[in-house]
Image: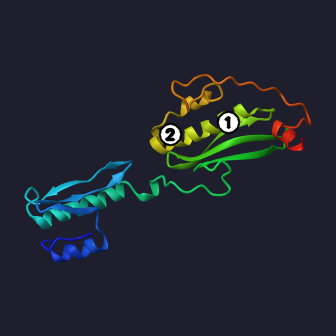
Amino acid sequence: MSIPDYVPEDIAKILVEDAHGISFPCRSGCQMRFIRKKKDLGGFYSYNQWGGIEKALRAAMSRNKQLKALHPTSKIRRVRKPTTETSCGFNGVGYREKIDKRRNEIERFFWVSYRKDDKPAVKTFSLGYTAFDADLHFHAYRTAIQFRQEWDEYGDEMKFDKYRSWRKVRLYEFDYPKFELTRRRRRKGEKLPEEAANDA
C-alpha cells in the first residue's frame, strides 16, 4: 500500500505493519474496507468531517479493530480444495459405505460437512440398504452438492427443513420437480447393481 506523505509519521508506521483495510483514493479522505459475506462494512472517512487527517485515520483504524472483534476470521467458511479422500471431488461433500452391525448390512450415503450455530455438523443423504439404480445415486449426489452450495451462500439462514423431502423432489432444479423413487428391498446376500456389474 502506498501511504501519502501527508499522513502523520506515527500513524504511517502503524499502517505499514497493519493496513487496517485503509486505502487513499483521494486527498479529501481515506477509505476503510472490511469485507464479510461479500459485503463491505467499512466506509469513507472525510478529513474535513472528522476534523483533520489524524482524527479521520484513527477513527477508521478504530472501526476496523471493532469489526475484526465482531467478525473474527475463525467464523469465515473457508473454501478448501477437495482432498483425495473426498470421492466426489466437491468441497465438503463425500461418499461413504458404512456397515450396520445390527442388520449386518451396508448402508451407502453421501455426506455433507458444514457448521450449524457455529458447531461442526454433518448432513447425510442415504441410499439405504436396498438395491438402487444410477438415477437414485445421481439424485443423492446432486442433492448433497446443492445442500452444501446453499450453506456456502446462506449459512445458518438457509432453509434446512426443505431437505426433509429430498427423496421426492429435485431440489437442485428450478421449481423443484418430482423425483420418482423406485427401489426394492434387497434379498439377503444379493449383490448391489454395481457389484454385479463388476463381477460380469
Which image quarter: residue 185?
Answer: top right
Q: Quadrant of the N terminus?
A: bottom left
Residue shown at 51%/24% (left/top)? Answer: 175
Would residue 117 appear left or right of 96 to someone viewing this image?
A: left
Check disc 1 and report the residue beneath it. 138
Query: What colour scheme does the image use?
Result: rainbow
Residue shown at 73%/35% (left/top)? Answer: 127
Residue shown at 65%/39% (left/top)? Answer: 141
Q: Which percent across, then down, holds residue 41?
A: 29, 51
| Viewer-nearest of discs 1 and 2 | 1
Above or below, 64 against 102 in this view is: below
Secondary element at image label 2: helix
Q: Which percent across, then down, holds residue 153?
A: 46, 42
Would residue 55 appear left or right of 91 to someone viewing this image?
A: left
Would residue 44 appear left or right of 147 to someone viewing this image?
A: left
Residue shown at 15%/71% (left/top)? Answer: 7
Depth order, front residue of 124/84:
84
Give the amino acid at mark 2: Glu
Q: Which percent across, then down, holds residue 66?
A: 30, 58
N-terminal label among 1 and 2: 1
Give the number of the disc on residue 93: none
| Residue 102 visible in the current orientation | no
Instruction: Give how far apart the Cα atoms at labels 1 and 2 are.
Output: 18 Å
Above or below, 197 against 89 in this view is: above
Check disc 2 and report the residue beneath it. 150
Depth order, front residue of 123/135:
135
Q: Residues within 10 Å of mark 1 (few under 14, many from 20)?
A: few
Above or below, 144 against 94 in this view is: above
